[in-house]
Image (cartoon, grey):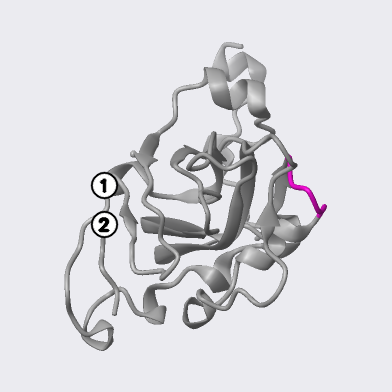
Amino acid sequence: MACLHDHSCDDNDCSSNWSLYQYIDITKVFALNEANPGSVKSVFKAWEDRLNTSGEHLVSNEGDPELLVFIPFTSDVKIKSISIVGGSFGTSPSKMRVFVNREGIDFSDAQSMQAIQEWDLVENMRGVLEYQTRYSKFQSVGNITLHFPESFGGDITEIHYIGFKGEATQLKRTAVANIVYEILPNPSDHKTRAESGGGLSHIE
């Protein structure tokens, strides 16, 4: 669902303070059916730069508007909303389906699997809409896959910005050294075998 409201973002949680951009593991982001390999990385940017369309952006292959985007995070996150800024002239995605903590999804999987949530999108070239999640379904998100089945009638799909709003947990997903503490065994805990018995915001 996308909800609309008028307010100052300095006083509400639509500001960059709630952006999860810094927790996206950009180097591991990838997309299926992108016309220019690696271009998907360009759509993840600071919230303040969401309307900057001067650089590279994500475009599907000609004649096939379907896109699948995999986004891993460096920390488990809770996602409150998702923002999509698409292209003009019917090239914005018209639908979005989401899968959480499912790696290795291809188009066949995405088309046959039940999404955790899906939205009918609105053309959002001004970046003023956010799609609210069913928040209880978006807790402890380590990675998220976005499926865009079609555009608004264009032969391609164009995406200039993908953003997430929410908060990060303290659980880091990067490898950390495990510290093992040796403790003196308690003899009573070490019996012999015999003893033991064998789940749209309007931004201004």
Is residue 177 visible in the rendered structure shown here?
A: no
Task: Tell me what residue is drawn at x 45 percent, y 62 percent.
Answer: 164
Residue 186 in picture, x, y percent from top left: 56, 45
> Label 2's element?
loop
* Type of amino acid under label 1: Met
Task: Tell me what residue is drawn at x 65 percent, y 17 percent.
Answer: 193
Q: Are marks 2 and 1 in contact (CB under 8 Å)?
A: yes
* Type of amino acid under label 2: Leu
Q: Residues within 10 Å of mark 2 (few under 14, many from 20)?
A: some
Q: Quadrant of residue 19?
A: bottom left
How far apart are labels 2 and 1 at the CA level? 6 Å
Write the start and end of the magenta stretch as one range. 33-37
- Report which residue position mark 1 lands on: 1
- Report which residue position mark 2 lands on: 200
Vertical relation: 21 (above or below) 36:
below
Vertical relation: 153 (above or below) 52:
above
Task: Tell me what residue is drawn at x 55 percent, y 58 percent.
Answer: 87
